[in-house]
Image (cartoon, helix red, strand yellow):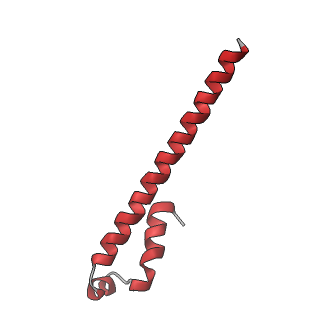
Amino acid sequence: MALASDIRSTETGLAQIVATLREGLARRKVYRQTLAELRSLSDRELSDLGMHRSMLTRIALEAAYGR
C-alpha cells in the first residue's frame, strides 16, 4: 500500500512540474508577443501612448509577469 501512495504523490509532483512549465511558457509567449507588438510601433505612435522606446522591455515584463 505504501508503494501506491508513493506513486500517486510522484504523479502529483510531476503534474505540478508540468503545470508550472506550461505557465512559464505561456507567460514567455505573452512577453514576446507584447514586445514584438510594441517594437512594431513608430516613435510617433509610442509618443501618443506616453511611451519611449527604452520603456518597452519593462512594459512587456509587466504585462507578462506583473513585475
Compared across the picture, whether 21 is left or right of 56 comes to: right
Expressed as whole percent of the image width and height from the top left, the position of residue 52 reads: 39, 86
Q: Position of residue 19 (x, y in %)?
A: 51, 41
16 left or right of 49 in image: right
**On screen, 51 above or below 66?**
below
Lateral position of residue 6 relative to residue 26, left or right: right
Q: Residue furthest right?
A: 2
Q: Is residue 53 depicted above or below 31 in this figure?
A: below
Q: Residue at x 30, y 85 (%)?
A: 48
Tell me where residue 45 sits by quadrant. Answer: bottom left
| Residue 17 to residue 7: above or below | below
Q: Quadrant of the N terminus?
A: top right
Tally the marks: 0
Q: Is residue 35 left or right of residue 44?
A: right
At a point 44% along the width and 59% down the height, the residue shown is 28
- Which quadrant holds the C terminus? bottom right
Q: Measuring from the top left, give residue 51's x and y in whole percent.
A: 38, 83
Residue placed most toward the observer, 45 or 1:
1
Q: Position of residue 29 (x, y in %)?
A: 39, 58
Q: Quadrant of residue 27?
A: bottom left
